[in-house]
Each structure stands twice: as structure tokens, then as C-alpha cells.
Amino acid sequence: MIPARKNAMFSRWFSGDAMRRIHRTFGSVRVAGLEELARRVTEKPVLVVSNHTAWWDPLLILYLTTRVLRVDAYAMMDAKNLRELPFFGKVGAFGVELDSRTDGARAIRYSVKLLDRPGRLVWIFPQGREVPVTARPLVFRGGSAEIARAARRAAVVPAAIRYEHGSTPQPSIYVSFGAELAYERDVARGTKVQEAAVAHELERIDQALLAVAGDPSEWTVLHERRPRRLDRALQRALAWLTRPPP
């Protein structure tokens, strides 16, 4: 297992860079359940379990935890990827050999030690790899449920991430945080409960995209790019030039 080598100064710089990259690339960032999560993490340590769908996920987590929630955050990462990208260790990533039971046990104990105080957050991707957002079932490994069983003082919060192209040139990011899960002593059942809870949050995003359910006000808009005046003017001019004859 590779422990985190968190550095406050580097985290501030790198999280700012992540935020700028996200704002340049995506037209909007919308988050549901943010206020409840922010309140929860002031009361107790929080274990977040979520789907893993894209290269952007680590940068998004860094942006949300460091720039938005402003918590002391850590995340589990494939040790192979952490060796290739060691700078993630400076912002709280710790590495685990996914196919080693011994290393997995070390990572579980390390995660439990981190979850020892309010203001601490550990983010886990129980799928263990990037999986298309439409794939079902989600197929969670049991490590996150092991951590939840051992870290009894921690709140377990499900989260769903989706990147979506729509009616604007830039794609949008949706993140949905659910309610705290009940404590589960049985790891097999805990794994199923976590998987079902994350799938439920993915459905919540689906409903928002389809506009068939849910209150739009529950989504906090962290970033939204407005169309530039020049672009709108050029579009109107092009429409006028290409209009059909009367």
C-alpha cells in the first residue's frame, strides 16, 4: 500500500488548477445534496462511495472536497496509477494493489485510521476501475463495506457522478449525494446496500436530465458558462445570411 503524502500548499495549487480545467471544459457543474453533506462532515468523519466513470473523476473530487467543501479529504487509488501519477499522493490519494488481499487489508486499516475525526472525508470507488455510467449492475467490491463496518463513527454517504452532453457546446457535470446509510455489520449486505444507494443517485440524475421528477432547486449550480455575446451575434448573423428566400 502507498500512503498519502498530503501537502497543504500543493493541494491549494493543484485544486485551483483542477477547478480552472473543469470550468474551461464543462459548461456547468450541478450538485445535489451538497448542503447536507457539508453539514454532516462537520459532525463526523464521512466515507463517500461512488461510481467511477471517467478520467475526470479525481480532478472533480479534488475540486469538490478542497475548493467547495473545504475538508481534509483523501481518496483510494489503484497503486499502479498512483505510481504513474505520484502527484496525486500530495493531495490525499493513497494507493492499493487491487488484486492483493493483503494490500487490500492494509488499505482498509489505513482508511479506518483516517476516518477518526469530523472534517475528514475519504472517497472510495468500490468498482475499482472506470466503468461506463450506463453499465448495470454497478458491481461493487467489498472493501468499502469493510471500511464502513470498521469505522463505526463515520457516516457513509453514496454519491453518483455523470458527465452529460446536451444542448450546449460544452458537456455538463452532475453529482448527486444521497442520505447517510445505516450501519451494516454484515459486509456482503453492506456492499449490496452501498451499490443500490449509488444506483439510486444515478437514477436521480437521470430524472433531472429528463425533467420528469425532482425539484430543480435541489441542484446547486457551482459553475455555469454563459454564451458569449460575440458567439450569439455571429449565430444571428449566420441565421440571417442563410435564411430561405421569401
Image (tube, rainbow, N blue to C red):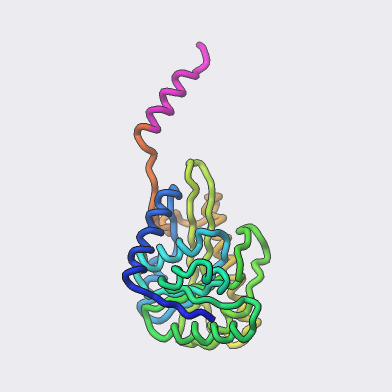
Asked if residue 240 is among those painted magenta in the image, a careful observer would answer yes
Position of the N terminus by quadrant: bottom right
Which range is magenta?
A: 231-246
Name the spot of residue 168 as percent of width and height, x first: 48, 41
Magenta segment main secondary structure: helix
Q: Is residue 234 above or below residue 8?
A: above
Q: Residue at x 34, y 34 (%)?
A: 229
User: Is residue 180 shown to the viewer in this render?
Assistant: no
Q: How many marks?
A: 0
Q: Position of residue 63 (x, y in %)?
A: 40, 63
Q: Is residue 79 left or right of residue 89?
A: right
From the viewer's perspective, is residue 198 above or below residue 147?
above
Q: Tell whether 120 sits left or right of 186.
A: left
Q: Position of residue 184 (x, y in %)?
A: 57, 84
Is residue 193 visible in the rendered structure shown here?
yes
State left or right for residue 191 relative to residue 215.
right
Dividing the picture into quadrants, the one containing residue 90 is bottom left
Instruction: Give 112 or 221, whichever is nearer the viewer.
Output: 112
Q: Residue at x 44, y 83 (%)?
A: 114
173 sits to left or right of 200: left
Query: Which residue is at a point 56% across and 71% down the rendered structure image?
Result: 125
Q: Residue furthest left?
A: 9
Tell me the quarter of the picture where residue 220 sits.
Answer: bottom left
* Residue 177: percent from left, percent from top: 48, 67
Who's the residue at 52% across and 50% down the image?
Answer: 211
The residue lying furthest to the top in this view is 246
Q: In this orientation, which residue lies closer to the viewer: 162 or 25?
A: 25
